[in-house]
Amino acid sequence: MLPAELVPKIDKIIHDEQYAGRNDFTVRLIRNYLDEKEERDKISKQYEMFEADKKRRLKESSSDNENEE
């Protein structure tokens, strides 16, 4: 299942970082991926909210300027 050239690298990480085995290492990789994805999704949502708020403020500002004229 694993590409042969990756096995020694993976086994070294497992040994050096004291994982219980390849399954333990795989579970850690999956958890890390899911945690990172969740964080990216949060940041993306915050950015969308920021952009929407910025657009709203610009619109309000331009309508305020029109009312002053």
Image (cartoon, helix red, strand yellow):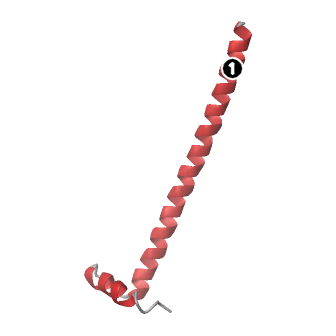
Looking at the image, is 56 positioned above or below residue 13?
above
- Classify residue 13 by image quadrant: bottom left
Nearer the observer, 3 or 67: 3
* Residue closest to the far front: 5
Q: Which residue is mark 1?
A: 62
Q: Residue at x 43, y 86 (%)?
A: 23
For residue 58, side relative to residue 33 (left or right): right
Q: What percent of the width, then of the height, locates residue 60?
A: 68, 22
Looking at the image, is 47 positioned above or below residue 15?
above
* Residue closest to the far left: 16
**How many numbered marks, from 0 up?**
1
Q: Residue at x 60, y 49 (%)?
A: 45
The quadrant of the rendering that contains the C terminus is top right
* Label 1: element kind: helix
Q: What percent of the width, then of the height, locates residue 61?
A: 65, 20
For label 1, the crowd category at 10 Å Cα-Cα, with few meaning under 14, some 14 to 19 and many 20 or more, is: few
Q: Inspect this view and state whether residue 50 appears.
A: yes
Q: Inspect this view and state whether residue 20 appears.
A: no
Q: What percent of the width, then of the height, locates residue 50?
A: 58, 38
Nearer the observer, 2 or 43: 2
For residue 40, side relative to residue 19 (left or right): right
Looking at the image, is 17 positioned above or below residue 11?
above
Q: Residue at x 61, y 41 (%)?
A: 49
Q: What percent of the width, then of the height, locates residue 28?
A: 42, 76
What amino acid is found at the position of numbered circle 1 in the picture? Ser
